[in-house]
Image (cartoon, rainbow, N blue to C red):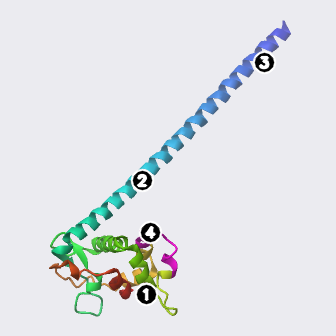
Amino acid sequence: MQTLAKDVIYGIGIVVGCVFLLAALVTEISVFFVLVAAAVNAFRIEHSRNERDESARQEYATLCQESSLAYVLIWAPTLKGDDNPTMSLAVQCWVESAPNKELYKDLFEASLDSLIQANPKQALRDLEEVSTPESPGLYPELRWYPPHQWTYHMMNSFEMGQLLIRIDWKKTNSVQKLPAEELPSFMDILQMM
């Protein structure tokens, strides 16, 4: 009888241990699924953001192409030490008020991307043309990336940072209605850097 009681207690102990082990396993599995769900959600958010960015770039490129035959609203910043706007840094505006610093950077980035994507082979030739042994510029770095990544690397480059800090935000220029041909080319922008 004593052996039977020990066996029953031993059996109950095994069952309780298995229940705890099973509960721990279920908890681990549920944590795993929560982490997987979070990762999938983060991927969806990032994918959605990339699609929105690409959609905005395409819309901007389409608007630029449609407006190339007409007059467009253009704003150009003035560099520190200059009195006149620098047309090589001009951007197309959609409203008649001058953009602030953040909006200008977004418009400039979209314009730069549109110029690159319109003709990537010509953009590569332009990069190579402004590159010299003494001053290689961005060509050595950008040639290893696909053209759709150039804008990102250019906007985050030391050269672009040095160019953009030269803008005098205290001087306010008005938005002008000018022919679309007044907008800078990719080469115009590269020569400023």
From mark 3 to mark 4, how far is it between C-alphas? 66 Å
Instruction: Evaluate if marks 1 and 2 touch, with contact meaning CB atoms under 8 Å apart.
Output: no
Q: Position of residue 134 (x, y in %)?
A: 51, 93
Q: Quadrant of the N terminus?
A: top right
Frontmost of labels 2 and 3 is: 2
Report the amino acid beneath label 1: Glu
Secondary structure under tag 4 reads: helix
Frontmost of labels 4 and 2 is: 4
Secondary structure under tag 3 reads: helix
In the image, is 190 to the left or to the right of 11? left
Q: Please state the extent of the stretch shown in magenta in the rendering.
A: 140-152
In the image, is 32 to the left or to the right of 178? right
Between 9 and 155, which is closer to the camera in this rendering? 155
Q: Is residue 50 above or below residue 44?
A: below
Q: Position of residue 13 (x, y in %)?
A: 74, 21
Between 12 and 76, which is closer to the camera in this rendering? 76
- Judge the density around disc 3: few (<14), some (14-19), many (≥20) Cα neighbours within 10 Å: few
Main SS class of the magenta portion in the image: helix
Secondary structure under tag 2 reads: helix
Residue placed under numbered mark 4 in the picture: 149
From mark 1 to mark 2, how far is it between C-alphas? 36 Å
Report the amino acid beneath label 2: His
Q: Position of residue 141 (x, y in %)?
A: 51, 78
Residue placed under numbered mark 1 in the picture: 129
* Magenta segment includes 144: yes
Report the amino acid beneath label 3: Tyr
Q: Earlier in the sequence, mark 4 or mark 1?
A: 1
Residue placed under numbered mark 3 in the picture: 10
